[in-house]
Amino acid sequence: MTRENATVATKNEEVNKIHELQEKLKLVEAEAQQLRFDNTRLQSSLVIAKQLLTDLTQSCPICGKKMLLIDWNTSAYILACNNTTCSAYKNPIRTLKKEDLIWLDLASAQASK
């Protein structure tokens, strides 16, 4: 192999390496974009989860006892006082969407894996 052929071969190898690196860069950029999207989605989910946990642990505004989560209909639960001596006994104080609570169950199941 002549010196000129060796130089051409070396340049071809360098060009091939550049192309490989460009392809890897595209993959890394796509993965980074997906991670940014997932991060944004997780942050918004965290806000929802914090609000749900706050709602689920709140006390009755009248007697101060812990409230009960009651299955209200096909799409919602209610939080109501479970103290029989309270004037707000079993009266809805807050409504929670079932889809939000199902999401919270799924998120906690995935977190425990």
Image: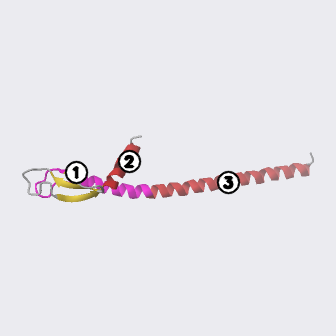
Disc 3: CA contacts within 10 A as few (<14), some (14-19) or many (>=20): few
Say which of 17 and 95 sits in front.
Answer: 95
Q: Which amino acid, by three-letter code, is at mark 2?
A: Leu
Residue drawn at (84%, 49%) of the image: 9
Query: Which numbered disc flags the more N-terminal residue, 1 or 3?
Result: 3
Task: State if disc 3 and disc 1 touch (CB < 8 Å).
Answer: no
Q: Tell me where the magenta segment starts and ends, as one range.
A: 41-67
Q: What residue is disc 1 on?
A: 69
Q: Residues within 10 Å of mark 2 (few under 14, many from 20)?
A: few
Residue 23: image tag: 3
Which element type, helix, strand or loop, lies under badge 3? Answer: helix
- List the residue tagged with mark 2: 106
Q: Is residue 40 left or right of residue 22?
A: left
Is 65 a magenta residue?
A: yes
Image location of residue 108, percent across then percent down: 36, 46
Badge 1 local density, few (<14 within 10 Å), some, or many (20+)? some
